[in-house]
């Protein structure tokens, strides 16, 4: 009997998918085992460590609660108002997702920091200055990041309420209060727990925000404590213990999240303002307008300040910054390639193995949402150490961990598209004998161009701006751009830091824009 | 000759039995009430629907369990017969080379197939830039190019208007006559069967029977067909 290319292709898919699954197991669980194993005896946790656990939970709770609470009225205002720039504002709300943390931090410091706008204003009024460092600062930065995410998630919820319901409500004489109770509250009840959990999860693994906005031992997250135990105390036992604690926290939140459908906030479907009949009152208009303006200012002013303060210093930046930028670019592009390859392999495997095993594979792909980069980094460090000098692998490890972190988002974007392609054109491709590489090249990739471009843009921007694992590995030389920026900040070279922040911001946005642009490229029928 | 030997198809709580032979070069309609399993029968022959029991043979060689592309079959589905992002030329060329890497002679073959169905010069257009009838012709050009001995139609023209549909069916009949291909076509319209199919397979009550002479079958319909025809 002749060789059947369909079987060969299937075997390849299973092999590649299995490989990716195995690698994800190593990344998400193997690294933890390595930490537990090589810890040369655990060190009991001290009081400070428990304080870190408490602080991690408290800041994540506050951040998630505030983000969601503030997002409800803002999303409601955006959902029921039409104005020039609405689309741009909603698009901008997607930006913090690809905004490097340190850039956001610098922007927030320019507004709320010691010499920031707010404090200048307070001083002008003869009032006491605010101190941003500590719990306030961490929560503020997290809200800055996640308020837009929460708003987008809820806005999708509003967009999902059929316009006919609002019309029916109007014919029944619903006021704003009735509309809220009958139409909006049921939607919120479904979406808010998921939005809260997503943000809670994101904030649990907060590292760079805590590193820059936290104030000493009273405002340290577990993630940060791992880094400190590892880098400053060289106490592997304590780092391992903390890594286990962090894994426990994330796994716990992950299990909770598993029971609630997690919204993504990445998709479209938010561009359709519904004609409303219950929102004409003047005080309502003023209220909505105030909320929208306040929300936009909260997002825009810090970013504008980063641009304004950075622009004069870009040309005078020292060469290390440009070298670091080049390294970051390489890492980002590498991570993008690896993420797309892993996502495609995994997505094909998910669809090839049937619903039950497919769900397990999909879960494995999404598990990285609850994974802690620092735990993975510590584990990989300990795995490499007996074989080679881990510092030589700083960039490679950073790239691989970034790829693992971006995988859940990429998978969520690409899997539904692939499912559609399979459903609508799988039979045709099968009957024509399109398998393997030819199928990928001729059918799958062209049809998936849009989500692929978007996923690539997200991954590249996330990786470009990531400050995490690299801090465990890198020495003086070999820093990425975010790490270089952090050094400039801690050395109080504020002009250079402002310039580097602008470069980092530009690079992240440009990467995202280029890939996304490519994905939108030729209008596919 | 296409042979279905004691074939049983099981899907959830649906089952279909078929034991029949179709002569080489025959043009056979598959009719029956909706939901009776006409498409399922075609799917089993084409290799998209697994067979629980029995064997399917073409010219004495078993093809049960072979993947669709390995079978000596061209198939046109109800929809999605073309890739919307590829040109008409590429859509046809896929019938020759799934890699789309074509030599000069092969490109000429593709052009000839397009010309055969009356689409000369339209190769660069995408499906969205073609009318419904032209889209059907692109798919048929691919069938011509594939030159497989067995052609299966699962109501690919059902979205076309009546006149256009008849035109397409006659084109299919012509093509099959030229290449000597055997035709199996699902239809819910008796007129289609009358127009081009000399024989008819009846699918009803979980059994596929036939083929019968179409004219005789319609003149003297059995119980199941009478109920369907009304």
Image: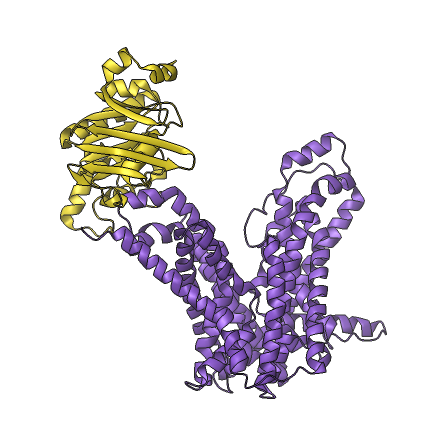
Chain colours: A purple, B yellow
Which quarter of the picture shows residue A163? Answer: top right
Q: Give the vertical position of B57 relative to A365 (above or below).
A: above
Let me know if residue B111 appears in the view: no
- In the image, B153 versus A147, the foreground residue is B153
Which quarter of the picture shows residue B29? Answer: top left
Which quarter of the picture shows residue B77? Answer: top left
For the point 35% across and 18% down, the residue is B224
Q: Give the vertical position of A287 relative to B146 (above or below).
A: below
Let me know if residue A266 appears in the view: yes
For the point 48% across and 57% down, the residue is A360
Image coordinates for residue A525, horizontal then vertical, percent: 40, 43
Is residue A486 found left or right of A353 in the rendered image? Answer: right
Which residue is at the far top? B219
Is residue A33 found left or right of A131 in the rendered image? Answer: left
Image coordinates for residue A292, horizontal then vertical, percent: 70, 53
Image coordinates for residue B93, horizontal then vertical, percent: 23, 44
Q: Quadrant of the C terminus of chain B?
A: top left
Q: Give the vertical position of A163 relative to B31 (above or below).
A: below
- In the image, A285 versus B127, the foreground residue is B127
Q: Quadrant of the N terminus of chain B?
A: top left
For the point 76% across and 35% down, the residue is A174
Image coordinates for residue A254, horizontal then vertical, percent: 60, 62
């Amino acid at each position: 009997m002749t060789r059947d290319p369909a079987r060969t292709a299937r075997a390849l898919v299973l092999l590649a998918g299995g490989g990716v699954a195995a690698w994800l197991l190593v990344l998400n669980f193997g690294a933890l085992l390595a930490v537990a194993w090589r810890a040369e005896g655990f060190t009991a946790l001290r009081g400070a460590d428990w304080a870190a656990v408490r602080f991690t939970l408290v800041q994540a709770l506050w951040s998630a609660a505030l983000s969601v609470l503030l997002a409800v009225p803002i999303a409601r205002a955006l959902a029921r108002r039409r104005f020039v720039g609405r689309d741009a504002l909603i698009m901008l709300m997607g930006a913090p997702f690809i905004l490097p943390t340190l850039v956001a931090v610098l922007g927030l410091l320019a507004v709320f920091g010691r010499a920031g706008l707010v404090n200048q204003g307070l001083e002008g009024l003869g009032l006491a200055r605010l101190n941003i460092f500590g719990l306030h600062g961490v929560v503020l930065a997290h809200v800055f990041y996640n308020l837009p995410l929460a708003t987008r998630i809820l806005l999708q919820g509003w967009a999902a309420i059929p316009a006919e319901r609002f019309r029916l409500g109007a014919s029944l004489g619903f006021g704003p209060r009735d509309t809220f109770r009958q139409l909006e509250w049921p939607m919120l009840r479904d979406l808010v727990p998921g939005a809260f959990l997503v943000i809670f999860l994101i904030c649990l693994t907060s590292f760079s925000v805590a590193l820059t906005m936290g104030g000493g031992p009273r405002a340290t997250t577990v993630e940060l404590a791992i880094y400190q135990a590892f880098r400053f105390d060289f106490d592997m036992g304590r780092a391992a213990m903390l890594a286990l604690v962090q894994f426990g926290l994330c796994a716990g939140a992950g299990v909770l999240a598993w029971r609630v459908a997690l919204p993504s906030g990445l998709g479209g479907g938010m561009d359709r303002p519904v004609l409303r009949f219950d929102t004409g009152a003047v005080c309502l208009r003023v209220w909505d307008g105030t909320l929208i303006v306040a929300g936009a200012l909260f997002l825009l002013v810090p970013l504008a300040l980063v641009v304004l303060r950075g622009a004069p210093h870009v040309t005078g930046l020292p060469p290390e910054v440009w070298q670091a930028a080049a390294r970051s670019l390489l890492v980002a592009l590498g991570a993008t390639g690896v993420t797309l390859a892993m996502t495609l392999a995994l997505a094909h495997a998910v669809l090839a193995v049937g619903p039950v095993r497919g769900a397990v594979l999909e879960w494995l792909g999404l598990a990285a949402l609850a994974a802690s980069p620092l735990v993975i980094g510590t584990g990989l460090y300990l795995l490499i150490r007996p074989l080679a000098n881990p510092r030589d692998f700083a960039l490679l490890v950073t790239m691989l961990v970034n790829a693992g972190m971006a995988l859940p988002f990429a998978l969520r974007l690409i899997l539904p598209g692939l499912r559609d392609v399979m459903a609508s054109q799988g039979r045709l491709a099968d009957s024509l004998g399109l398998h393997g590489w030819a199928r990928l090249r001729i059918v799958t990739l062209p049809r998936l161009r849009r989500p692929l471009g978007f996923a690539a843009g997200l991954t590249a921007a996330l990786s470009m701006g990531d400050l995490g694992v690299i801090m465990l590995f890198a020495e003086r030389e070999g820093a990425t751009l975010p790490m270089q920026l952090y050094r400039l900040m801690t050395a109080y070279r504020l002009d250079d830091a402002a310039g580097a922040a602008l470069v980092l911001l530009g690079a992240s946005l440009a990467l995202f824009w280029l890939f996304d642009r490519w994905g939108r490229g030729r209008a596919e029928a | 000759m296409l042979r279905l030997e004691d074939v049983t198809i099981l899907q959830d709580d649906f089952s279909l039995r078929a034991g029949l032979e179709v002569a080489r070069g025959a043009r056979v309609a598959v009719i029956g009430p909706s939901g009776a399993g006409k498409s399922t029968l075609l799917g089993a022959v084409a290799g998209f629907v697994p067979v629980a029991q029995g064997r399917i043979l073409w010219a004495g060689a078993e093809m049960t369990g072979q993947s669709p592309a390995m079978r000596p079959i061209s198939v046109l589905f109800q929809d999605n017969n073309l890739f919307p992002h590829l040109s008409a030329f590429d859509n046809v060329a896929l019938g020759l080379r799934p890699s789309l890497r074509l030599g000069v002679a092969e490109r000429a073959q593709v052009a000839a197939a397009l010309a055969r169905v009356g689409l000369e010069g339209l190769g660069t257009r995408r499906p969205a830039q073609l009318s419904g009838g032209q889209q059907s012709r692109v798919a048929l050009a691919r069938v011509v190019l594939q030159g497989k001995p067995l052609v299966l139609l699962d109501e690919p023209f059902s979205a076309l208007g009546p006149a256009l549909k008849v035109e397409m069916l006659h084109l299919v009949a012509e093509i099959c006559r030229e290449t000597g291909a055997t035709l199996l076509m699902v239809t819910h319209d008796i007129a289609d069967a009358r127009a081009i199919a000399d024989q008819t397979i009846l699918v009803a009550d979980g059994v596929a029977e036939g083929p019968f002479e179409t004219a005789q079958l319609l003149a003297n319909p059995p119980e199941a067909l009478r109920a369907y025809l009304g």
